[in-house]
Amino acid sequence: MEAEKFGVSQGGVLQAIFKHQQRHHGTSSTPTNQSKSKTFQEKQVEEQLARNKDAGLLTELIRDFLDPAEFYQAIRRSGIDFFCGVPDSLLKDFCAYVTKNAPEGSNVITANEGNAVGLAAGYHLATGKTAMVYLQNSGLGNIINPVMSLAAPPVFSIPMLLLIGWRGEPGKRDEPQHMVQGQATPGLLAALGIPFQPLPDYEEGAEQALQTAKHYMDSTKGPYAFLVKRQTFLPYKLPRDNSAGYPLTREKAMQVLVRCLNNRDVIISSTGMLSRELYEYRVSQDMGHERDFLTVGSMGHASAIALGVAMKKPKRMVFCLDGDGAVIMHMGAMASIGQNGPTNFKHVIFNNGCHDSVGGQPTDASKNGFNFIRIAEGCGYKQAFVISQEEEIEAGVARMKESDGPVLMEIKISSGSRKNLGRPSRLLQENRDDFMHFLAIG
């Protein structure tokens, strides 16, 4: 009773966590009886819960976590029942819950963030209701045009609730590209005329924030944003779907492919796990990194970067190592490649059907009827083919080298990555300088 005078029930956070675990993971109501196969995030949560218990009445030391299920229900109670966007690592637990539990047709993982704003606008025009758009703050650039020329109150005045993962939040460590974006995020939202607030990490605060957002959107008919800090949500894992049964992992497929290249071949690798795996493979083989441009940000633009290199270095084989989600995000680049791409342009898509680095939410490339080969052929690629077996990679690379490009090889792979996968430790400018020197030789 004494703790309740201070606005917190001692152990209340613990009870909420354990209730969440029982409801969604089938675990016991005590930490000691939980499954031993915990993720790093789940272990961090447990450690914090122990610190919460030690804090006692010192409420300022309590660290709260939002239950994705309870936040989802609170959103539904506020009148929002349609969700769309691009998954993010800071939102992965909430996005996973929505992907698993939202009724069919009420959650759409879009090609890019701008598409999500357009979809939310169409939903509002058809129903008069408000949608939630989820995204990482690195996707703010993709929403600027549709927000300013479509949703803004002085234009069509269309309300939507933006849930934005705040990578690079000031005062937190992150990768260089996220640090730049994180510093700029509040200013970008202010410049767009979108009011925002950090999403509280406890249920009552989140409910109040939703009421504030609802009041603004009802009265102003414009977008409102929540900025989500790291570890706001309790863990919620989306079950991995490897029903397709492809034997190759992305990392293994990449390693076999790289071994088939020669010392003059050029690699531009896509955002996410692929570039990290390529970097670690080079380290393990003591190969150096000058042959690779690791596109650590700019999701969806690796192929355009590769096109620019290939057009100006016609005597070098240029291999773009891409992912299905990245290709879909800015698929228009394939039209530019097909119509302008030189004979030395070689495009490889590692297709696991999901956004692997942000929780495993599915991409459209996982669905029946989606076909990268037909898309490439329709865009003007000279050849396009698909493989899925390790023994096919060497022959596939040889075929790409012998054929005039642009040529596409799609590799169907399983989802998932190593738990101990690291991140590149070199400065990005060092990678750029070494890569440019490599291109300049010969």
Image (cartoon, rainbow, N blue to C red):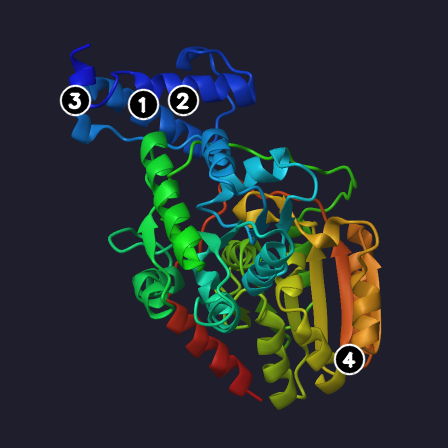
Mark 1 crowd level (few <14, some 14–19, many ≥20, 10 Å Cα): many
Residue tagged 1: 49
Residue 203, picture quadrant = top left
Find out whether the residues at labels 2 and 1 contact each other: C-beta distance under 8 Å. Answer: yes
> Which residue shows up at 80% across the image and 50% down it?
389
Residue 166 seen in the current view: no
Q: Amino acid at mark 1?
A: Leu
Q: Nearer the viewer, mark 3 or mark 2?
A: 3
Q: Amino acid at mark 4?
A: Gly
Q: Nearer the viewer, mark 1 or mark 4?
A: 1
Q: Amino acid at mark 2?
A: Ile
- Tell me the distance, in whole angstroms, between the alpha carbons under discs 1 and 4: 56 Å
Dot placed on the residue nearer the N-terminal end, 1 or 4: 1
Q: Dot 1 lies on which element?
A: helix
Q: Which mark is residue 405?
A: 4
Find out whether the residues at labels 1 and 4 contact each other: C-beta distance under 8 Å. Answer: no
> Which residue shows up at 34% across the image and 70% down it?
191
Residue in the foreground of this view, choosing between 204 and 435: 204
Residue in the foreground of this view, choosing between 206 and 180: 206
Place of residue 250 in the rendered image (x, y in percent of width and height, measured from the top left): 66, 51
- Tell me the distance, in whole angstroms, between the alpha carbons under discs 4 and 2: 54 Å
Dot placed on the residue nearer the N-terminal end, 2 or 1: 2
Residue tagged 2: 17
Residue tagged 3: 6
Residue in the foreground of this view, choosing between 374 and 410: 374
